[in-house]
Amino acid sequence: MTSLTQDIKEKLSNLNVLEKIIAINVVVFLLALILRMNFTWFELPSDFSKFITKPWAIITYAFLHSREDPLHILFNMLWLYFLGRMFLNLFSTKMALNIYFLGAISGGLLFMLGYTLLPSFFGGSSRLLGASAAVRALFIFLCAYMPNQDIRFFTFNLKLWYVGAVIVLLDVLGLFGDNAGGNLAHLGGALLGYFYAKQLIKGQDIGKGFEKFVDSITGVFKSSKKAPLKTVHKNKSKGDSYTKSDFNQFNNQKKIDVILDKISKSGYDSLTSEEKEFLFRAGK
C-alpha cells in the first residue's frame, strides 16, 4: 500500500499544472458519481443576491460537472489536456493559471449578468457548473495570439483562428437553445481569452494583478514563523578552504577556478606565492 501511495504521489508530482486541474476535476466528478453527492453549495447561482452568500462559487463551479452528463467532463478535460500541451510549450505556468481562472470568473460574471438583465430571455433562475468557460479562455487566447498557426484536422491543415471562430459561432447559436446560460458563460471565457491575448501582444499582461492577489491570499496561509537565529562562522573565501597539498592535487582548470574565485572574494594580494606563480604561468 505504501508503494502504491508513493507511486501515485510521484505520478502526480510529474503532472503539469493543467493536468493537475484535470485530476482534481476527475476526482470531484468520481466522488459525486460514487457517493451520489450534490455539491450545490459550490455551484454558481444565476442570482447575484444568492451569489453574495457564497462568493467562492465564482471559482469552485469550474471544478464541478453534472454526474448525469459524463460527456461534459470528458470533452472538457480532453480539450484542456491538448490545450495544456500546446500552451505550456509557449507560455508560463502562472499565465496558464491566470487565463484559466480569469476565464472561469468572466464566464461566471457574464452568466449572472445575463440572467439579471434579460431574465425573460434566459428564463427562471439557474445554476452554472463546468470548466467550459475556463477552457474556452485558454483556447481563444491561443487563437487570438497566433491566429495563423496551422493545426492538423484529419488530412488537411486549418488555421487556428478558423476553429476558434466556429467554436464562438456555435456558442452564439447556443444562446437560443436549451443551454443558453452555459453558452453565455462560454462566451464570457472566450472574451477574456481574446482580450488577454490582444493586450499581451501590446506588451501588457492583464493577469498580473490577479496573480499578485492570489499570491497575497496564499501567503496568508504560509507559516510566518521565523527560523531561530544561528551563529555562523563564515569562511573568508572558497579559496581559503583548501591546503597547499590540496592545491597541488587539483587539475589545471580547477586551480584556475579556485584562484579566480579567491581573487574575486579577497583580492589579488590574498594569493599565496604558489598561486601567483601558477596564475602567471597559466596566463602565458
Image: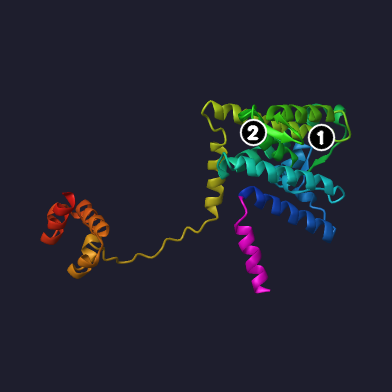
In-front residue for pair 252/30: 252
Structural distance between the alpha carbons of marks 1 and 2: 24 Å
**Residue located 74% across and 26% down the image:** 165
* Tag 2: amino acid: Leu
Give percent across and percent down for residue 199: 57, 27
**Residue located 80% across and 36% down the image:** 182
In terms of sequence position, does the residue under pointer 1 or pointer 2 come before the other? 2
In-front residue for pair 218/135: 135
Give percent across and percent down for residue 108: 73, 37
Label 2 crowding class (10 Å Cα cut-off): few <14, some 14-19, many 20+? many
Question: What secondary structure characterizes most of the magenta part?
Answer: helix
Which mark is drawn over residue 143?
A: none
**Residue located 84% across and 51% down the image:** 67
Q: Which quadrant is home to the N terminus?
A: bottom right
In-front residue for pair 38/192: 192
**Rendered position, 248 above or below 100:** below
**Residue located 13% across and 56% down the image:** 276
Label 1, on which residue? 181
Label 2, on which residue? 142
**Rendered position, 161 above or below 86:** above
Give percent across and percent down for residue 158: 71, 29
Q: Is residue 277 left or right of residue 173?
A: left
Q: What range of the chain is rendered magenta?
A: 1-16
